[in-house]
Amino acid sequence: MLAEELARIGSGGVAAGLGAHISIATPPIWKFGSEEQKQRYLVPAIRAEKIGALGITEPGAGSDVASITTRAEPVEGGWVLNGEKTYITNGVRAHFIVTAVKTTREGGHHGISFLIVERGEGVSSSALQKLGWHASDTATISFQDVFVPEENLLGGLNEGFKLIMANFQWERLAMALGAVGAMTIAWERTAAFARERRAFGRALSEHQAIRHKLADLATSVYTCRCVTYDALRRFMAGEEPLREVTMAKLLTQRASFELMDACLQIHGGAGYMREYWVERAARDARLGPIGGGSDEIMREILGRALAL
Ligand SMILES: Cc1cc2nc3c(=O)[nH]c(=O)nc-3n(C[C@H](O)[C@H](O)[C@H](O)COP(=O)(O)OP(=O)(O)OC[C@H]3O[C@@H](n4cnc5c(N)ncnc54)[C@H](O)[C@@H]3O)c2cc1C
């Protein structure tokens, strides 16, 4: 409900900033953290006293998460961290970054761990400019000889890949729910516009081409909702619905972008103007098929799940 309602406010960036804190940075602490880590990070995060970010992506490793190079060297009492993360949501504002690091020389699936890194000496961020999601903070974060105490290891040593995979399921579901919310409000607003705006002596919605387009879009919203809710029900029932979550992410993110583009078209020139909500919605929706695992990666996962 929260994911859908956040999307309905009409700012992808606000939903992204809050979503990164709620849906991807803090759930690993809730799921894999020690009691002490929960008290130190989760409790203030829930109270909105501390902002969290999840740092996985690097300049040289996005889709191929196993090839990250940020290195944590073991030292007395903890680790020393060096490396760079990029495209990190809340990357400038976050008080702590749940960070994927290499804890073996080889790295890869069996050599990645997670450290909770507090902002402090050696941690610096720089903001990035984006096509959409302007209200969210996206940044590159660099770590230079950052000491991280051993009690900040999240989950088991070298078991980080498991954490990444577990986190992705909820992230992708939350993205699908967000798309359903954004599509619903966009359809409602565009239908209202089409009923009101007149051309050639009639309302736009009285022109068959526009009416049929809106009918197709309503079908797309309904299909996305059904597929997402089915994946959500399975997830909440404790199944491991990898296939259904992947399909929901793949379907909804592309459908949302296509719907926003169609809504913009129905608005005509007004749709291209900053003063209309749809200009922002179209830009915001473009991230969906890239973030949280791209369309191509979703198809690769499905290819494996379908034994292809
Ligand atoms: C606004 C924004 C916010 C983000 N927030 C976060 C965040 O909070 N934390 C975080 O860790 N990351 C975050 N990301 C990173 C995001 O998850 C990655 O951008 C995404 O996973 C893709 O990685 P990449 O950009 O390195 O693209 P690449 O992996 O370089 O891919 C480039 C293209 O190649 C395709 N491709 C890659 N591999 C294959 C393959 N095997 N077969 C076919 N095609 C392939 C991809 O689909 C894509 O089209 C964010 C990104 C953006 C843009």
Image (tube, grey):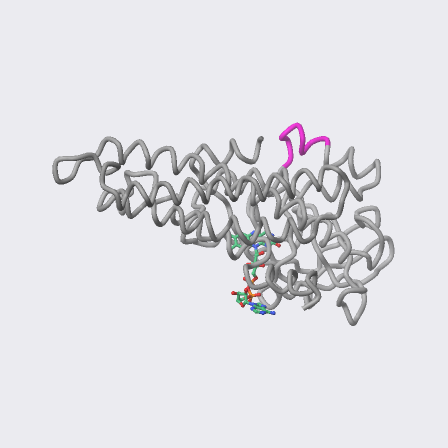
x, y (%) of residue 235? Answer: 71, 41
Query: Which residue, as the protein is rendered here, is positioned at the far bottom?
Result: 106
Number of numbered tags placed on the structure image: 0
x, y (%) of residue 199? Answer: 15, 39
Residue 41 image-quadrant placement = top right
Quarter of the rendered image showing ligand 1? bottom right
Vertically, is 284 above or below 107? above
* Towards the viewer: 129 or 291: 291
Write the residue at 34% across / 38% down.
277
Q: Is residue 201 magenta?
A: no
- In this orientation, does residue 85 appear? yes
x, y (%) of residue 125? Answer: 56, 53
The N terminus appears in which quarter of the rendering?
top right
x, y (%) of residue 245? Answer: 64, 49
Query: Which residue, as the protein is rendered here, is positioned at the far top?
Result: 47
- In this orientation, does residue 62 appear? no
* Towards the viewer: 94 or 100: 100
The C terminus appears in which quarter of the rendering?
bottom right
Residue 302 image-quadrant placement = bottom right
Write the residue at 80% across / 44% down.
32
Vertically, is 151 above or below 187? below
Write the residue at 64% across / 66% down.
64
* Towards the viewer: 165 or 203: 203
Q: Is residue 254 left or right of residue 281?
A: right
Q: Is residue 80 left or right of residue 189?
A: right
Report the magenta residues as a range: 43-50
Query: Which residue, as the protein is rendered here, is positioned at the far right?
Result: 76
Vertically, is 300 above or below 9? below
